[in-house]
Amino acid sequence: MHVRRLLATLVVVGGVTLSLLGQTRPPVEGVGSGAQVSADRIGRLGTDWTPVAPAHVASGPVPRLHDGKPDLSGPWVGGGSNDNIEDDGGLGPGEFPLQPWAKQLRDSRRAENEPYLYCTPMGVPRSNPYPWRFVQAYSANGPTHIFVLHENGDAGGHRQIFMDGRPHPSDPVPTWFGHSIGSWEGDTLVIDTVGYNDKFWFDARGTPHTEQLHTVERWTRVNYGTLVNELTLDDPGAFSRPVQLKFSARALPPGYELMEFICAENNQYGIAGGIENVYREKGFGVERSAP
């Protein structure tokens, strides 16, 4: 289902994205152009696939930075929810603790109306089948920031995680990615985030949250090819209790990088050229607020 939605999105963003599909990435050992769905690839993106590191590479040791900390850079694919946060995060049907009003809202939503399809950021913990990466920044005084960059899905934006020991602001402005502070517990990166807006969906199913959302992510690179995200979601406005989820991201093959993907809010890519916006009547983005 989500593959079809992604393909529809690729069509909407027209020449910008279709030109990217014509670009080539390095070949993956043992994976040819006619390969079927396998352990070597994740998610179909139009006419392309997102390959992952082959088993003999993925099982290798964790690379480390000059300070001994794990190199989390990637690029990665996966590591979060997408179609259904319950299933993606390891829960059974009905185990996600939504309050009655939130469950009713989720059940009223339709996948074709999700904000992500209108070139708005995915938020946390969304992760689509396109690659993404951590960028770990240092100064003379040590680590300062970690940035999260997505090839597609964040409207050209990025998420920043402060690594300099600052606290959360007392009254953060609600944003798509919230205010994130990070620290290391051994080899695990812990990211604590508050200050989210309530505009993004947790999944294509429409699972909602409120501005009271608080997330704690614990990212651990267990080998070269696997990055585990143990996530705590707490939102007293929408959940009956905090919930624990677990996701895994997989590394792309060595030599692969993110490609450029430009998407303007509400898919306004074609206005200057007189191209009709097929999503205009859906009502999300510059026309009016999302349901």
Image: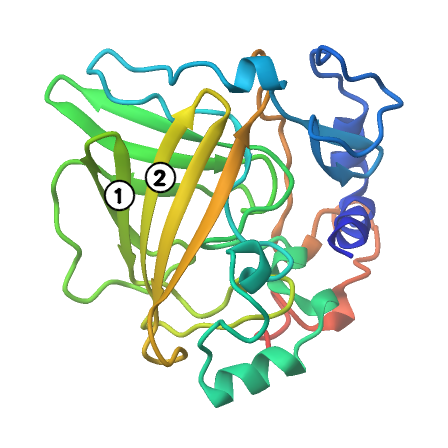
Kindly report the distance in space between the C-alpha atoms of the residues bearing marks 1 and 2.
6 Å
- The residue nearer to you, when weighing 264 against 236, is 236
Q: Is 35 on the left or on the right of 43, as rendered?
A: right
Amino acid at dot 1: Val
Q: Residues within 10 Å of mark 1 (few under 14, many from 20)?
A: many
Q: Indicate the quadrant containing the N terminus: top left, top right, bottom left or bottom right.
A: bottom right
Amino acid type shown at disc 2:
Trp
At 44% from the left and 33% from the top, the residue drawn is 227
Residue in front for this viewpoint, 53 or 126? 53
Name the mark on residue 219: 2
Identified at 47% across, 35% down, the residue is 149
Can residue 256 be seen from the camera position used here?
no
Percent across and percent down for residue 18 are: 81, 34
Front position in the image: 35 or 192? 35
Residue located at (58% from left, 26% from top)? 258
* Percent of width and height locating residue 27: 73, 11
Task: Say whether residue 195 is left or right of residue 148.
Answer: left
Residue named by callout 1: 190
Looking at the picture, how far across and down is residue 201, in whole percent?
A: 54, 65
Q: Residues within 10 Å of mark 2 (few under 14, many from 20)?
A: many
- Judged from the image, the secondary structure of the residue bearing numbered disc 2 is strand
Image x and y of residue 169, in percent: 16, 58
Looking at the rendered image, the quarter that the C terminus falls into is: bottom right
Residue at left 35%, top 80%? 237
